[in-house]
Amino acid sequence: MNSYGSFPGARPRRLRTTPAMRRMVAETRLDPADLILPAFVREGVTEPVPIGAMPGVVQHTRDTLRRAAVEAVEAGVSGIMLFGVPEEAKKDGLGTAGTDPDGILQVAIRDVRAEVGDELVIMSDLCLDEFTDHGHCGVLDDQGRVDNDATLERYAEMAQVQADAGVHVVGPSGMMDGQVGVVRDALDTIGKEDVAILAYTAKYSSAFYGPFREAVGSSLKGDRKTYQQDPANLRESMRELALDLEEGADMVMVKPAGPYLDVLAKVAESVDVPVAAYQISGEYAMVEAAAEKGWIDREKAILETLTGIRRAGAGMILTYWATEAARMISAGRR
Ligand code: PBG
């Protein structure tokens, strides 16, 4: 009896008493197979180039990318999402290097496919911003605005060259209206009906993309607010979701992850296709920076962020920690 004359009727703490008990009742488990590694490959470099705002992440050479793919397989990671960084001189208004069959992204897809075959799901970013000199995700009209329908034609061509290079999944990330439908048609037209589409369904105009812009050497001056979503909106994502599914998306994604867990949860409960979340560059950078200062426990923080994203409903998580986190998860089980 306590001094108030009663015992608590329920004691949730009983189920938290030992590690074995906590493990048994855990509602969310991480598995290496949930993880997908985003990776950058830079044209014309002989050594990997560190990315200042993403300590531990590099712009790979063709060789180190192959090695990173093998390490991901060995760690049990499911997929790799490739981003190409072309030579500066090859950028132009149309992002021509993005549709060149010998462009860096296509070369990287072929390299990784040759190295690991079907052991990893090979995915590619289908967007023009890495290849345009103005840094936008599409082509511009004569008033400097991103021209939706002209951009769709570029995406169709890009999907076809990526498919020809051997990609398993394309990830249209430019937030143009109608992009999933156009990409599906373009793939089917050349007999690539088995290439799947991971739709960037809810992609917000986020400050947390900052480090990525360095990672791909983006020349963007303005912002992407006329095509990426306003962080204030949730219902808008449900509209984007309905459209992507109608247009043939095989999987859908929410991005960024951490600041948008409510969107993720709502998307996940609304669909029957696989749901992914992208833990983006700024989310990575925040944890790394705080850990470097000794302000948080790095490994615990990494696993906690991934657990939160999984708990909110993502079956797949794109994270720059994929290989390391997969190893941590496996080590934790032994
Ligand atoms: C578009 C693209 C971006 C990211 C993935 N695909 C940049 C953007 O939309 O501005 C960001 C990924 C990250 O920040 O980690 N090509």
Image (tube, helix red, strand yellow):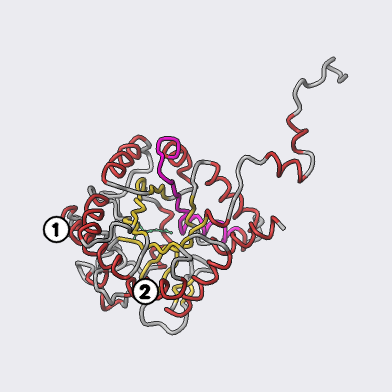
**Residue at x 45%, y 63% (from the top left corner):** 80
> Mark 1 highlights which residue?
141
> Mark 2 highlights which residue?
110
Check residue 276 in the rendering and tell me which mark sits there, or answer none.
none
Q: In front: 70, or 305?
A: 70
Across and down, in percent, residue 35 comes to: 52, 56
- As helix, strand or loop, the secondary structure at mark 2 comes to helix
Across and down, in percent, residue 30 comes to: 59, 50
Along the polypeptide, which appears first: circle 2 or circle 1?
Answer: 2
Q: Are marks 2 and 1 in contact (CB under 8 Å)?
A: no
User: Looking at the image, is 118 positioned above or below residue 209?
Assistant: below
User: Looking at the image, is 104 positioned above or below residue 307?
Assistant: below
User: Looking at the image, is 241 positioned above or below residue 116?
Assistant: above
**Residue at x 24%, y 73% (from the top left corner):** 100
Amino acid type, label 1 = Asp
The crowd level at tag 2 (other Cα within 10 Å; few <14, some 14-19, many 20+) is some
Across and down, in percent, residue 78 comes to: 50, 59
Q: Quadrant of the C terminus?
A: bottom right
Residue 22's quadrant in the figure? top right
Residue 222's quadrant in the figure? bottom left
User: Which marked residue is nearer to the observer: mark 2 or mark 1?
Assistant: 2
Q: Quadrant of the N terminus?
A: top right
**Residue at x 52%, y 58% (from the top left corner):** 284
Across and down, in percent, residue 160 comes to: 25, 64
Q: Is residue 4 magenta?
A: no
Q: Which residues are magenta?
A: 268-290
Q: Is residue 271 magenta?
A: yes
Amino acid type, label 2 = Arg
